Amino acid sequence: AEEGKDNYICRILEFFEAVDGTPYFTAQWFYRARDTVIQSCCNLIDDKRVFLSEVKDDNPLDCLVEKLKIVHLPLNVDMYSKKVAIPDCHYYYDMMYLLPYSSFVSLPPPDNMGSWK
């Protein structure tokens, strides 16, 4: 991200090499609450909560900064389970943000590996 801003957050979907040998990756982007339509209420949203998007693009491999642990939690998880899962990760998500419609949708429950299908 720009100087003084939080880095962007993505899920890496694929690594590949361009014809000229430059390494790239395909990213699927997450949004923080302050980067969505609910930005005026972002102080009410947990800082660790992010929203998966359908936005995907290709980026040079050298723009990656660090590896993060992001956990997919069911939307209706009880508070105890959420408190147990959250300290063990950098971020968590339980909804998808549809940028073209400025809306949020539920995701299917995570599979046994904790990832989204």
Image (cartoon, rainbow, N blue to C red):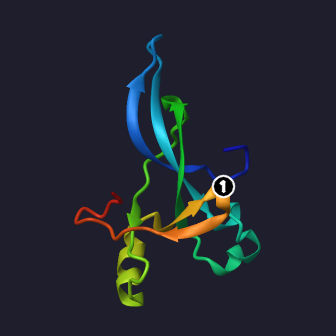
What residue is at 42 percent from the left and 88 percent from the top? 79
Eyeballing the image, is 51 above or below 1? below
Q: Where is residue 83 in the image (x, y as percent from the top left)?
A: 41, 83
Q: Can residue 48 be seen in this view?
A: no
Quarter of the image with the N terminus in it: top right
Q: What residue type is labelled 1?
A: Pro
- Image x and y of residue 94, in percent: 46, 71
Q: Quadrant of residue 57?
A: top right
Position of residue 81 in the picture relative to residue 25 (left or right): left
**Residue placed at 37% from the left, 89% from the top?**
80
- For label 1, count other residues whose C-alpha is less than 10 Å away and answer few (under 14), some (14-19) or many (20+): few
Q: Mark 1 sits on what residue? A: 100
Give the residue drawn at x 47%, y 67%: 93
The answer to whether residue 2 is above or below residue 91 is: above
Q: Residue furthest front?
A: 101
Could you tell me which quadrant the C terminus lies in? bottom left
SS category of the residue bearing label 1: helix
Q: Which residue lies furthest to the left in this view?
A: 112
Q: Position of residue 82 (x, y in %)?
A: 40, 81
